[in-house]
Each structure stands twice: as structure tokens, then as C-alpha cells.
Image (tube, coloured by chain):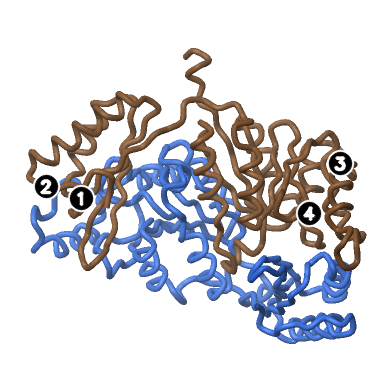
Chain colours: A brown, B blue
Amino acid sequence: MSSNDKIWTAGLVVIGDEILSGRTHDKNIAQVASWLQVQGIRLSEVRVVPDVEDRIVEAVNALREAYDYLFTTGGIGPTHDDITVDAVSKALGVPAVVHPEARAILERYYADKPGGLTEARLRMARAPEGSTLIPNKRSGAPGMRRGNVFLMAGVPHITAGMLDALTGTLEGGAPLIAETVGCWIAESEVAGLLREVEKAHQNCQIGSYPFFREGKVGANFVIRSTDKVDLQSCVDTLCDGLATSGYDFTPGGI
Amino acid sequence: MSSNDKIWTAGLVVIGDEILSGRTHDKNIAQVASWLQVQGIRLSEVRVVPDVEDRIVEAVNALREAYDYLFTTGGIGPTHDDITVDAVSKALGVPAVVHPEARAILERYYADKPGGLTEARLRMARAPEGSTLIPNKRSGAPGMRRGNVFLMAGVPHITAGMLDALTGTLEGGAPLIAETVGCWIAESEVAGLLREVEKAHQNCQIGSYPFFREGKVGANFVIRSTDKVDLQSCVDTLCDGLATSGYDFTPGGI
């Protein structure tokens, strides 16, 4: 495999009791996953852990070693349950320190707000020693990067802003591209065809995603590859196979 | 701690490339989490892994040993990318076999459907040897339980039916109950108060969940406990503290 073919990978640690209690529906997994695809980086594993230091340390250390990049969401706010900076610092073996640039950002941000830069708000200027900042245009308090570890907010629209700021700055490989073909049939009717077509196209994976809508069963078949030509060839073979078997299909998916 | 005080825990392994690619927004984490709360079982960790056997085996073995129960969602359908039964069988060290009862269910279900019980559909009757079935009233193919491991569908409304079938059948402890108090303030204004109130109520945790709506910042404070009396006392102390500081608050949350 040449260095051009390297598959770049990432892990994600979602931190927060609110996800594990079912109170908050996570939106960051899908958001980070989609963004990584465009950067040519494959999200390879996600762990959701509670607001407990040891559990965060364990997950961060496991995933930062296993993958090229490690992202965290959640736990970088001003309150007592925001312990991500401390936990990640512990995982990295460095102290958590007030980052001068983050402090300056917060001083400006809170200058005209009631209370100003309180002790609680100053917590949001803390970072693992040696971090650089990830800008946050939406609410002042920045994310942080140290080595291959990226600490981001838990509130989805703030996370989105931090991802925007990181766009194009991380080395990745060829993005995984995908085409979808939809069919109003039970996926089990074409299971053999899907298996054969995938086997005949080494650089492609086919995923089958059944659904039940408008009182009918159907499925979307998603063909993924890093190679455009291989992808198109696989899509064509699948569509030919569906047509030969007498099934109508919808390019682009249903 | 008496046996009545035992905290029952569960892990969840979400299986599927479609979640890690961002194509599908997972709904099962929140659904399983909320259901477990009612059963008096705490969801303690979630891992999302791709459709790769070794990765499923690793996650299943880690979580089934760490927690009282282990649930999986996804990968039990009829197509080539449905490998959960094989992976979990490998993790448990037993063969994957056709379950006679599951076969009978599928024979009845497909009797009047085009194609009948094909080889692909029969894959859905396979289970780790020694499993019992989890009924699926919505689409025939059942889930499976073996020991503390529960294999469920990936399609959320089918997963919901399987959870319904399991309701009240698993031993759990006192359910974690929660009360929410909402405030149109930046959480950083009351970070000190939240910390103090939590410290004064040992059996309670307070989570702070900021939001930005209608052009204003606000936060919901969620107080959780297994004890109703402690919970109410903690809520009262927090509300008194907010009132004393001159903040309006909304019982039940915003």
C-alpha cells in the first residue's frame, strides 16, 4: 500500500450522562461522521461514556492509540459536571492549565456580559498543557487540540462551528464515496444478488438498509468505495442484476 | 450496600457501517437508554462498531464482562452484511445454529409471501447455540438472548417491539428518577450554586444542559437520584438558591 492509499481513521468519545440516560438524543455522532467522510477520514469507532473521570481516561487512551485522530464531544463547559479537560489531561499525562489565548478570548467575550469573566467561566479557558485552540465563533469558549486529540463542545450547533473551523486542516486520504439504489422489495429477496455483486467488486462494500414506509417494505442499497470507476461499475452491475430479476429500482435511493 | 441497593448496569453495542458513515442517524441509543431507565438498569457505556467480525467480538466481550447486561442492535437481517449472529457466537465460544423455533416462526411468516422461506431468509433463524428468542411482532424474524447478551434489530421500530417484549422480564434496581429545572440564564452564572447543591446532596447528581433558543441562552438543570425524598430535597435547595440569587426558573424545565 503506498502512502497515498493510507486509510485515515478516527475515534469519537461522546461524553455525558444525558446521552446514557436517554434524556438527550445525540446528534454529534452523525455530524462528526459526515464531516469526517468529507475530510477523507473514516470514523472507525464511537464510545459513549458517563461524566466519570476514569471512564473518560480509559476511552480516550484506547481510541487515541488505536486511530489516527480522536475527537471528544461534551464536558468542556463551566459547570461542575464538565470534567473533560481534567480527564483528557490525565489521559495525556500533562497538567490542565489556563491557556492564555483562551483566557483573552473569554475576557473579550464576557466584557459586556453580566458578571464578566467569573471563576466558573474561567474554567472554560483551561486546556491540557501544550494545546492549541479550535475557534468557536458562536459562544466564545474554544475547543482544544493536543496532538491527535480534539476536544469539542457537546451542544451540536457549537460543535458544528468547531468542525467548520477544522475543515481542510487535517490530513486525510481519498474520501469514501457512495451511491444509493432503492427498491420497494424485501431485502431478503435480493440477498444472494447483493452478496455476489459485492464479491465481484473488491474495492466496494454494499450495505443493505431495509425500511417500512407507506405500508410497504423497501430497502436502500448503499455502495461505497474510494474509487469512482469501481463504484460506478459496481452500481451498474447491481442495477443490471435487479433489472434482470424483474425488480424496479430507484437510482439515488428511496 | 445491601442487595437491594445493587446498581444494575448495561452496555450497548451498536453495529453498523451506516451509523459510522453518518448516513443513518442512530435512534437506538436513546431508545434503549430510556427503556433501561424504566427497568431500573443503568446504561453505562455504548460502543458503535463497523460490520467487521473482530471488532464486534471485541466490543461484545468487553461489555458483557463489564456490565450485568449487554445489548446489541443491528446486523441480524438476511443480507451478507448482517454478521452479528456469527460474531456474537464467536465471542461466546459457541456455534451459530438454526434455532428450530425461529425457523418455525419464519416458515409461518413467509408462507404467504413471494419466494417463501428462501436460504437468505433462513439466515434470520440462526442464533448462538443455547439462545432463547425475543419475539418480534412487527416483521417475523426474532431477536435472541443468550445469558446476559441480547441481540436486537437495527431498524428502530422493530427494536422498539423487541424492547416491549422484554419489558419487566429483567432484574433491575430502583429506577433512577429525575427532575428538571429550567432557567433563561447562562449556566456559568450559577456554576458555583450547582456545585454546592450537589455536594450537599450525596445521593443526587445534577447535570447542567445549556441551550440557545429564540435568540437567548438558557439551561436545564437535571437532578437525578434513586431516592424520591433526596431528589425532592435537592430540587428544593436548588430552587431556593436560584430564587435567592434573583433568577426566575421553570419547574419541569424549558
Q: Are marks 3 and 2 on the same chain?
A: yes
- Residue at mark 1 to residue at mark 3: CA–CA distance: 54 Å
Q: Are marks 1 and 3 on the same chain?
A: yes
Q: Is residue B148 above or below residue B96?
A: below
Of badges 1 and 3, the one in the foreground is 3
Q: Secondary structure at mark 2?
A: loop
- Residue B198 found in image quarter: bottom right
The residue that mark 2 highlights is A247
For marks 1 and 4, the one nearer the N-term is 4
Mark 2 falls within which chain? A
Q: Which mark is residue A83?
A: 4
Q: Secondary structure at mark 3?
A: helix
Q: Amino acid at mark 2?
A: Tyr
Q: Secondary structure at mark 4?
A: loop
Q: Amino acid at mark 4?
A: Ile
- Residue at mark 4 to residue at mark 3: CA–CA distance: 20 Å
For marks 3 and 2, the one nearer the N-term is 3
Q: Tags 1 and 3 in contact by the CB under 8 Å rule?
A: no
Q: Residue at x 16, y 64 (%)?
A: B109
- Residue at mark 1 to residue at mark 2: CA–CA distance: 8 Å
Q: Are marks 1 and 2 on the same chain?
A: yes
For marks 1 and 2, the one nearer the N-term is 1
Viewer-proximal residue, B128 or B213? B213
Mark 4 falls within which chain? A
- Residue at mark 2 to residue at mark 4: CA–CA distance: 54 Å
Q: Is residue B138 above or below residue B74?
A: below
Q: Is residue B209 above or below residue B90?
A: below
For marks 4 and 3, the one nearer the N-term is 4
The residue that mark 3 highlights is A101
The residue that mark 1 highlights is A183
Q: Secondary structure at mark 1?
A: strand
Q: Position of residue A29 (x, y in %)?
A: 54, 50
